[in-house]
Structure formats: C-alpha cells, structure tokens
Image (cartoon, grey):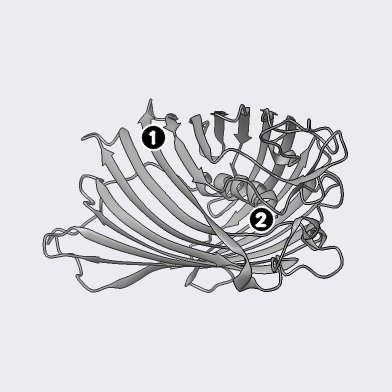
Amino acid sequence: MRKIYLHVLFLYFGILSTYAQSRPEPAKTDSSKYQSRKLKVDEVNLVSAYYHQNGNNSAVTGGIGTENLSDFANTIDLQMSKFNKKGKKNTFVFELGVDHYTSASSDKIDPSTISSASSADTRIYPSLNWTHSNEETGNSFGFTGSYSTEFDYQSLGAAFNLTRLSKDKNTQFDFKLQAFLDQWTVILPVELRTGNEGRGHGQYDTAPRNSFSASFSISQVINEKFQAALIVEPSYQKGLLATKYQRDYFTDGSLRSETLPDKRYKLPIGLRMNYFLNDRFVIRTFYRYYMDNWGIRAHTAELEVPVKLNAFFSISPFYRYNNQIGTRYFAAYGQHAPSAQYFTSDYDLSTLTSDFYGAGIRFAPPKGVFGWQRLNMLELRYGHYSRSTSLVSNIVSLNLKFK
C-alpha cells in the first residue's frame, strides 16, 4: 500500500525541494578571516503533510476495489555546523520522519479480520548526513546513513554526495551514490497461505530487496536570467520486487500472488530550466524521460511560476503532467493468461496519464513570522493529483523553518 501514496508524496516534495534551489554564493567573511569553531545550530525545519486518496483499482484485490488511504507524515531536521582549524565547514543534518497511514485495501489481505499486515501502520525513518565543504570554492563532499522500519519491512541506507563548482561558479557538478538494503516480510493473501503462515509476525518468511542508484547532474548559468541543469539517475534493484499480498486473477478463474522479475533497471533523464523574468516572476520548467527493463516508458513535464508579491511574501502555482506506457506484465482483473511467467494488476504499473497541480504560499518577513524572530519562514502548500485510472488524491503540507 505504501508505494501508492509515496508516488505522489515524492512528486510533491520533489517539487517543493527544487523550488528552494539557488546558485551558491561565495562565503561572506570578515577581514580577520575568523570563523567560529564551535558547533552551532544553523536551522531547524518542521514539515507536516496530510495525504488522502481514493480510487477503485486496488492491487490487493486484483485491480478492483477501494484504494482509500490516508497518511499523516511528519519530519524534523536539525542542521548544525562548525569550522575546523583550516577554515573548512562541517555540516551535520539529522532528520527524523514519522508517517502514520490507514489503508482500506490492507484489510482485504485477510477480509475476515483486520489484517496484521498494516491496515494501519507507522513508519519511522531517521537519517544523519555529514558534509565537508569549502565555502570559498563551493566544493563539498559528504556521507549519509539512514534507517527505516514498519510492520513488513526494515531498510538500511547509505549515500555519498560530491559537489564541484567551476572557478567562476557558473558551472556546478553534483554526484550522488545511494544504496538501500531492505528486508521484506513475505505476506500472502489469506486464501493462498498454508501451514502456519500468518499466525504470527515471527512466522512469516522474509526476503531481501536491494536498491542501488547514482545521480549525475550538471548545472549551468547561461546568463543573468537563465539557468539550466541536466540530471541522469540510473538505478538497479534486485530481490523481491513483487508485493506478494497483491492478488492476480487469470482467464481460467485461477488466483495467484503477484509475481515480477527479481531484477529491475531504471533510467530517468531530466532537464531543468529556470528563467528569471524580473524581480517578481520566475519561470521554472522541468522535463523527464523514464525507461526501465520492464517495458515502462514515461514522459513528465512540469511548470511552476513563483510570484513575489512583496519582499517577504510569494505564491507559487505549479502543474505537472505525466504520460506512462505500462509494463508488459500488467493486465486488468481476470485478464492474465494462465501461461504467464510474470503478472501484476497494480495500476501504478499500467498505461496511464496523470495531472498534478496546486500552489504554495511562502511567508518570510525580516522580523520573523508573526513577530517571532526565530521563526524565519512559513510555507503552506496544496496539491491535487488525478490520473486516468480514476485514482484521485489531495495533499496539504506545512513547512516551518527556525533559524
């Protein structure tokens, strides 16, 4: 169930994070070149988001049935920094996320009871990043460690990031490597269980799912008003890639648990272009092409136009369109051939189109929000998602920044 709403959440917070990107500026130092070596708190960010979706193509019940789901997500990140004896900056970012969701389709894993397989569940995911940077050149590198857990999976993650800027700071290269080593609990639909399966959490089998990805991006300042960036993000997954409690129905009336290949290669290629029209308007555009070895092909286009109403208040309407050709393994309820080796009725993997639009308001007065100097920024955002498979969702988020 998690992947249904995370798809939209990642779209939403992906848009949210890119709005804040700007060209790094040279560090401002006083004439003595002195930098404090004490560890200090730079900023604290609190983000809360509420997400709700509905539809009638639940993969748990073979591509039919309710997709009603609600999620309340909260993250807090604490950014601290200190300078070493050589004047280099060390930044530490600790983030803690807690999501709680309820899913009507989860109950259908075992319709006779409230399923132990997360009709309601909580996910906890802490992470810690350390980045070492030279503020004069803008160059940096860092490492991240992360962990995530909920009822049916645990995940360990690690990442390395590298940033290099040209001498004139008009060209920036970013590189990132990530690895996630997951352990999934293999939960079958109740009618496909045998023996002691499902009688207790400790009696479920487990299976690994490992994900490895890289990100290469190069950003270029074309002129005072125009910036562009090219992003390539190849990834590879191996292990249990099917969700085993999702049912598939065949033309002969039989029923099986979802089965997909245990390897998947993905290649998204994106192009971002920002044009600063004047002091009030910025035009941000993004295009991404996606392909994988399961046969999925997708085009995504996004437009966002932040409008600065005054020195500390702005509004940012956005729109994103996606067109996807589904995997060769997808078929609707009761349409799978009995001879098929791989099969899914998960509409996230089907041929579809989708629209995602909304707006955000950002309030950052020089004397602090509501006169509270420490509360540096308040941002409220809303997004509405709809796709051709009848799934619709809404998300609202609040972001508070303390400095």
Disc 1: CA contacts within 10 A as few (<14), some (14-19) or many (>=20)? some
Instruction: Choose between 245 and 71: the one closer to the eye.
Output: 245
Classify 385 as above or below 127.
Answer: above
* Residue at the image point whose x is 18% and y is 58% from the top: 88
Task: Tell me, yes or no, if residue 376 can be seen here.
Answer: no
User: CA gap, disc 2 to disc 1?
Assistant: 29 Å
Q: Is residue 386 left or right of residue 112?
A: left
Q: Secondary structure at mark 1?
A: strand
Which label sits on residue 2? 2
Q: Percent x, y for residue 3?
A: 65, 50
The answer to whether the residue labelled 2 contacts the one labelled 1, judged by CB atoms less than 8 Å apart, is no
Instruction: Choose between 322 and 293: the one closer to the eye.
Output: 293
Position of the N terminus, as image quadrant, is bottom right
Q: Percent x, y for residue 46?
A: 54, 67
Farthest residue, direction front? 195
Q: Percent x, y for residue 281?
A: 57, 37
Q: Is residue 312 left or right of residue 352?
A: left
* Residue at the image point whose x is 42% and y is 44% from the top: 212
Task: Name which of mark 2 and mark 1 comes first in the sequence.
Answer: 2
Task: Tell me, yes or no, if residue 241 can be seen here.
Answer: yes
Disc 2: CA contacts within 10 A as few (<14), some (14-19) or many (>=20)? some
Position of the C terminus, as image quadrant, is bottom left
Mark 2 or mark 1, whichever is nearer to me? 2
Q: Percent x, y for residue 56?
A: 86, 46
Which label sits on residue 217? 1
Instruction: Choose between 10 and 154: the one closer to the eye.
Output: 154
Image mark count: 2
The three-letter code of the residue at mark 1 reads: Ser
